[in-house]
Every structure is written in structure tokens, then in C-alpha cells.
Image (spheres, rainbow, N blue to C red):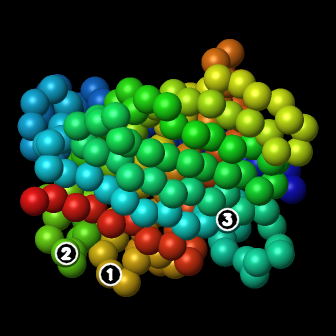
Amino acid sequence: MERRRESNWLSVAAFVLAANMVLAFAGAGSAPALAGGKGGGGRQDCWMTGGGSIFPAGGPVEYGGDPRITHGFVLHCVPRNSDNLQINDHGTGWNFHLATLTSAICIDDPAIEPNPPDATFDTFVGQGTGRCKNGFTGQEADCTAAWTFTDGGEPGGCVRDTAVIEVRDLNGNLLFSVSGVVDCGNHQAHSQ
């Protein structure tokens, strides 16, 4: 169990480092290509949809094994009022509901091919604020989430798509986090 926690922390640290590098390089023009637009990436006509399960470090296990974190979303590269993200940690009982998408960067990573269908990006790095509730204890809190979702093409999930998620309360306390491949789900990048 201790090794699993250590691996999750390393994954979260890698995510935070990668997200900070993307944010820092976006203004300098040194990052992978952004999906277009001004001020940090994104076009009005680009968005990502999807969801599925992510299992804790150690890889996919049979259902009924290690607790999983499930997610579902519709997120735009230029934030809109209709953006939606729900994350459920089946192990701790915490869930997150997005209220406001505060940061969205859509990236075209040359090592990832999101097609079909054609899309001008494959990686969505986002942050948002929302409400958390623990279904086991009834505890509620305002919270923040940071995530990176990738679309590795079709067929999605189980190997090609990945997710890194971190949810914290407003005091900065980690409520839950996970990183890994999307099992039995799919992320899909869209652009027109």
C-alpha cells in the first residue's frame, strides 16, 4: 500500500511539473503546438469529451478489486458556461463537480495521434473550481481540480487515452488523485 501511495505522489508531481511547464512555455512559444487562438491556447471550435475509469497505480484490475476513479466531461478549449466535469473516487467516497473552468490549454503533442476524427489537438490541460462531497461521510467542501486528459486515437480507452487528476480543498489539502490509462472509456478531441 505504501508503494502505491508513493507512486501516486510521483505521478501527481509529474503532472504538476508538466502542467507548469506547459503554462510557462505557452507564452514563450517553446511548448508543443497549441490548438490555436490567443492567450494560452484554444479555439472557440475545439473541445474534448469523454470519460471512463482510472485505476490506482499498478494498472487495471478486475472490477471489484482496487477502488477506481471515474470521470465524465465536456470541456472547451475556450471556457464556456456549458463546460462540465464530474469525478468520483469510489475508494474515498469523494466526488467533484465542476462549477467554473478557470484554465484550459489544448495542445497538439506530436507523439500522440488523436484521429479519427480529425482534430487539431490531443491533450487538454485544465484547472477549475467546484464543489466536493463525500458520499461516505456527508462532508462537503469548495475545492479545486487540475487535470490532463489525452486522446490517443481510436479505439479509445484501455491503452490509448490517459488521465491525470488531482482534487484539493481550498486549504490545499489533497482529497484524491490518480493517473493512468483510461480503462473501459474514451476521450475524444473535437475541432471544426
Decide which of 97, 152 is in the foreground and name it. 97
**Do the CB atoms of the residues marked 1 and 3 lie less than 8 Å apart?**
no
Which residue is located at x 37 percent, y 84 percent? 155
Q: As drawn, is 25 to the left or to the right of 38?
A: right
Residue for point 20% across, 57% down? 121
Relative to 93, is 155 on the left or the right? Answer: left
Answer above or below: position of 97 versus 69: above
For label 3, the residue is 55
Q: Quadrant of residue 36?
A: top left
CA separation in Å, label 2 and label 3: 27 Å
Q: In whole angstroms, how far apart are the C-alphas of marks 2 and 1?
A: 9 Å
Between the C-alphas of marks 1 and 3, the distance is: 21 Å
- Tell me if I can see residue 35 in this picture: yes
| Placement of the N terminus among the 4 image quadrants | bottom right
Q: Which mark is residue 49?
A: none
For numbered disc 3, what is the local secondary structure? loop
Which residue is tagged 1? Answer: 154
- Position of residue 153 measured from the top left corner of the image (x, y, whole percent): 30, 75
Q: Residue lying farthest front?
A: 82
**Spot occupied by residue 2 in the image (x, y as percentages of width and height):** 85, 51
Q: Position of residue 5 (x, y in %)?
A: 77, 49
* Residue lying farthest to the right in this orientation: 137
Confirm whether residue 123 shows in the render: no
Neighbor class of circle 3 (other Cα within 10 Å; few <14, some 14-19, many 20+) is many
Disc 2 residue type (three-letter): Pro
Q: Earlier in the sequence, mark 1 or mark 3?
A: 3
Q: Which residue is mark 2?
A: 117
Q: Residues within 10 Å of mark 2 (few under 14, many from 20)?
A: few
Could you tell me if the residues under marks 2 and 3 are in contact, i.e. CB atoms within 8 Å? no
| Location of residue 77 (image quadrant) | top left
Q: Nearer the viewer, mark 2 or mark 1?
A: 2
